Amino acid sequence: MTTVVSPPFSQHDQHQLQKHLRSGGVLAFPTETFYGLGGQALSRQAVEQVFALKRRPVEKALLVLALPEQWEALVEVPPEAQALMDRFWPGPLTLVLRARPEVPDFLQGPGNTLAIRHSPHPVVQELLRLGEGPLIGTSANLSAHPSCTSAAAVQEQLGEALEVLVDGGATAGGLPSTLLDGTQTPPRVLRAGVLSAAELGLQ
């Protein structure tokens, strides 16, 4: 049975969420666009659960959400990418960067890369603090199904296999975050999204 909690979190909620994340558990939560699905990014158990819940092909790498003090230990940031971070983070911009050697293989994408984002959503920021580390932040839906803008839609798609659901009400939906390959100079758009190439200064 899925446990549903809603912000603002009580002390009991905070304790239970922290315990769940530390044990390698997975949960769904609101972001500024759609509901996300994640757990501690450096936990193999959490990563494997996310792939299983979404029925996601294992060759498709996962996005990571992180706070500024967390991403420095995960990726190498070239000057062009740093300038974009300074201007657009927190916000709907995902950067694919070179993973640092200590990042486990199960989290890395092709070419030893990692897709990373800094979300402004208060629930995401609190979960990052409670989890004391970066979180997986893929969309909370079955692969090839529509992304979800409500807790009810998440529950309908993922069912009782989802252990914890943070119900933050309806999310904005719309376009996803813009995905950039920050390993290239200049960075290259991999997926169009909220921020246009022109807004990013890439045209």
Image (cartoon, grey):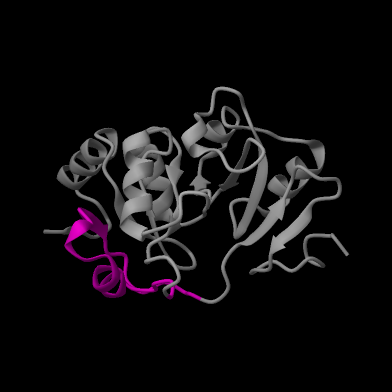
Which segment is the magenta one? 146-173
- In front here: 28 or 142? 142
Image quadrant in which the C terminus is located: bottom right
Q: Please tell me which residue is depicted at 51% across the width and 41% down the height of the picture.
A: 66
Q: Find out whether residue 138 is within the magenta segment.
A: no
Q: Position of residue 176 (x, y in %)?
A: 56, 67
Q: Please tell me which residue is depicted at 43% across the width and 71% down the height of the picture.
A: 147
Residue at far right of view:
203
Image quadrant in which the N terminus is located: bottom left
Q: Please tell me which residue is depicted at 25% across the width and 58% down the height of the picture.
A: 165
* Residue 3, image quadrant: bottom left
User: From what the image shows, is residue 125 above or below residue 155?
Assistant: above
Q: Position of residue 52 (x, y in %)?
A: 33, 52
Q: Find out whether residue 161 is within the magenta segment.
A: yes
Q: State left or right for residue 42 relative to residue 16.
A: right
- In front here: 123 or 41? 41
Q: Position of residue 21 (x, y in %)?
A: 28, 39
Q: State left or right for residue 135 relative to residue 184.
A: left
Q: Please tell me which residue is depicted at 38% across the width and 32% down the height of the picture.
A: 132
- In front here: 118 or 10? 118
Q: State left or right for residue 38 relative to residue 115.
A: left
